[in-house]
Amino acid sequence: MNILITDVVDSSLIQGLIELGYRPDYRPDITQAQVLSVIQEYVGIIITTKIALDRSTIEKAVNLKFIARLGSGLDHIDCSMAMNRGIKLYSTPEANSGAVGEHAVGMLIQMLHHFTDSNNDVKKGNFRSNPFRVTEAEGLTIGILGYGHTGPALARRLQGFDANLIAYDKYRTQGDGFCQLVSLEQLRVQSDVLSIHLPLTNETRCMIDYQFLSTCSRLRYIINTSRGYILDIRDLLRWTDESESRWASLDVLDQEDTTLYTAEEKSMFQRLVHHPRIFITPHIAGKSHSTRLKHARVLLKKLNDECRSSH
């Protein structure tokens, strides 16, 4: 049973697959075009965001039994077609939810404490405190939009900040003791901080637009560690520019390969990176030194459980 591995993984994943009876073909440098030409040879494929499994690719995967996505977000997979063909889908959002939660905390503290701006000012030979006066998290209401894996991870890490934690998730009705579940309307009107933890679907694409933001009467800080297309960048810039008390921290953009930018996208990117109250990190929230091992452990457990249940 040949398994194609399309990106760098922890060695324990390869060994674990062998122990489960698979023959892993480790090709971390494989391209999209090469996947298309060889996918018919495999019963399983393990991917990250580098490889997309669209309709044309899945059509050629005549022997494919499962798709394993290391991480969260299945927006680059034609899930409907895969399921219609009986291909099982696995993902491992549990593995890097902690790293994403920590990153979101760091983004919040960066905005509240002005680390980047004050550090740059010191490097210029200044030692001023008044321009960089801190806003404390204590007493702020932090709204978490999406409460699947990374949302709760953020809530757990915010314990002790003495902030008010609320969350909305369309598909969740039970809380966990770390924050209060509220309606979407309550989240909009109560949140001083909004942290986005949604998957990219037809329902969530451009969900956070100017109309949404304009109903968030108290909102001053936005964090997005989910997917770029969920937050409309043009509307974010418009909203941020309306008040000097509004800030945003982004780990994701619509298009993250700057070599593919159109002229309009280049202009938008320049506005973002030079904006004094917008901070961007290069889609690293879920990429810690330990996440590869965690992804391996989670996926191997799921595959092992599936093997046991089928016997």
Image (cartoon, rainbow, N blue to C red):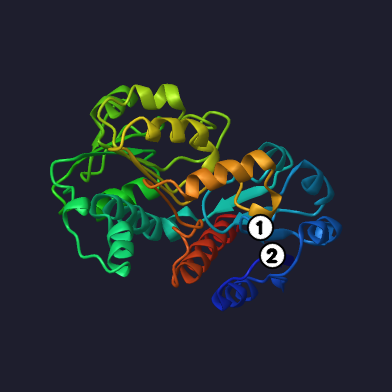
Quote the CA–CA distance across marks 1 and 2: 8 Å
Instruction: Using a 10 Å C-alpha cutoff, classify the residue at mark 1 as few (fewer than 14 neighbours), some (14 to 19) or many (20 or more).
Output: few
Q: Nearer the viewer, residue 245 or 208?
A: 245
Q: Which of marks 1 and 2 is nearer the N terminus?
A: 2
**Residue 276 in picture, x, y percent from top left:** 38, 47
Horizontal relation, residue 262 to residue 218: left or right: right
The amino acid beneath tag 2 is Thr
From the top left corner, tell me how far across and down residue 120 is, in percent: 33, 63
| 191 over 41 or under it: above or below | above
Q: Where is residue 84 in the image (x, y as percent from the top left)?
A: 71, 37
Q: Which of 186 and 259 is in front in this view?
A: 259
Crowding near the residue tagged with mark 2, few <14, some 14–19, many ≥20 C-alpha atoms within 10 Å: many
Marking on residue 6: 2
Q: Residue at x 47, y 30 (%)?
A: 235
Q: Is residue 24 above or below residue 114?
A: below
Residue in the picture at 31% in, 22% down = 185
Task: Answer with the quarter of the image where residue 187 lies.
Answer: top left
- Residue drawn at the location 43% of the way across and 21% of the way down: 211
As helix, strand or loop, the secondary structure at mark 2 comes to: loop
Residue 110's place in the image compared with 300, above or below, is above
Q: Which residue is drawn at 67% across and 36% down?
A: 80
SS type, badge 1:
loop
Residue farthest along the front direction in this orientation = 125
The reply to whether dot 1 and dot 2 touch (C-beta < 8 Å) is yes
The residue lying furthest to the right in this view is 37
Q: Give residue 50's mark.
A: 1
